[in-house]
Image (cartoon, grey):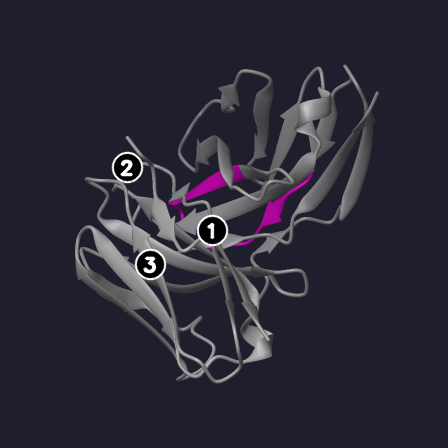
Amino acid sequence: AQKITQTQPGMFVQEKEAVTLDCTYDTSDPSYGLFWYKQPSSGEMIFLIYQGSYDQQNATEGRYSLNFQKARKSANLVISASQLGDSAMYFCAMREGQGGGFKTIFGAGTRLFVKA
Amino acid sequence: DAGVIQSPRHEVTEMGQEVTLRCKPISGHNSLFWYRQTMMRGLELLIYFNNNVPIDDSGMPEDRFSAKMPNASFSTLKIQPSEPRDSAVYFCASSSPINEQFFGPGTRLTVL
């Protein structure tokens, strides 16, 4: 069963504007973690941001913020003030259970194009 | 820290040959993950280890694939015999009990 869903195969955004990448998840475990990774054309996987299921506040890391809506089971990534270097593939991922030693499932990804 | 190290970075081989991919996790990380990425199937978890013990290998596609972690600083993913459909980028990632997974640079495998 698909547990992580990214419904936007591709997104365009104008440079300096904000963009939201959607992610919904499905789990019955009350303890889980949500992640976003960036994969530029060079191929490496870069960790961006993490949200724990018990965290009261939305996670933020610089220009990245995670819009966590627990009841809706969504964990959208918001990138503010887009830059050309933000053009990349973005993956949402979920880990069920606490700690780093648990299985992490990745979504299909969203390719973001930033226009000058 | 050098990060997760994978070797080789690129591998081109012929169908039927044995392929061994190597991974050195970040020192102190006790979990190690092997992923395969293709255009068609995206990023798939093949197997992962906790404290050198395989926990879940349900993603390993066939018996041709095997993985080992003989110690905390080394893991291998072996394909024997290799087939063209095994062509993909193979990532190794490691994590500690409290943090996210750190990915290696990947090995791009081409099976002719």
Which quadrant is the N terminus of chain B positioned in?
top left
Q: Identify the mark nearer the N-term, 1 or 2.
A: 2
Identity of the residue drawn at 62% across and 46% down: A24
Disc sitting over residue B106 in the figure: 1
Residue B98: which disc?
A: 2
Rate crowding at label 2 as few (under 14), some (14 to 19) or many (20 or more) other CA atoms within 10 Å. Answer: few
CB of mark 2 within 8 Å of CB of mark 3? no
Give the mark toward the camera: 2 or 3: 3
B61 is higher (above) or lower (below) than A84: below
Give the residues in magenta. Answer: A22-36
* Residue B80 in the image: above or below residue B32: below
Residue A29: image x %, image y %? 41, 53
Most extreme residue toward the left, as rendered?
Answer: B71
Q: Say if labels 1 and 2 share a chain.
A: yes
Dot 2: element: loop
Chain bearing tag 2 is B
**In the image, what residue type sits under mark 3?**
Arg
Residue A114, placed above or below residue B97:
above
Q: Could you tell which of marks 2 and 3 lies nearer the N-terminus? A: 3
Q: Relative to residue A11, is residue B33 depicted above or below?
A: below
Residue lying at 40% horizontally and 47% vertically, measured from the top left: A30
Subunit of label 1: B
For label 3, the residue is B22
Q: Where is residue B23 in the image (x, y as percent from the top left)?
A: 32, 54
Amino acid type, mark 2: Ile
Asked whether the viewer can see residue B93, the reply is no
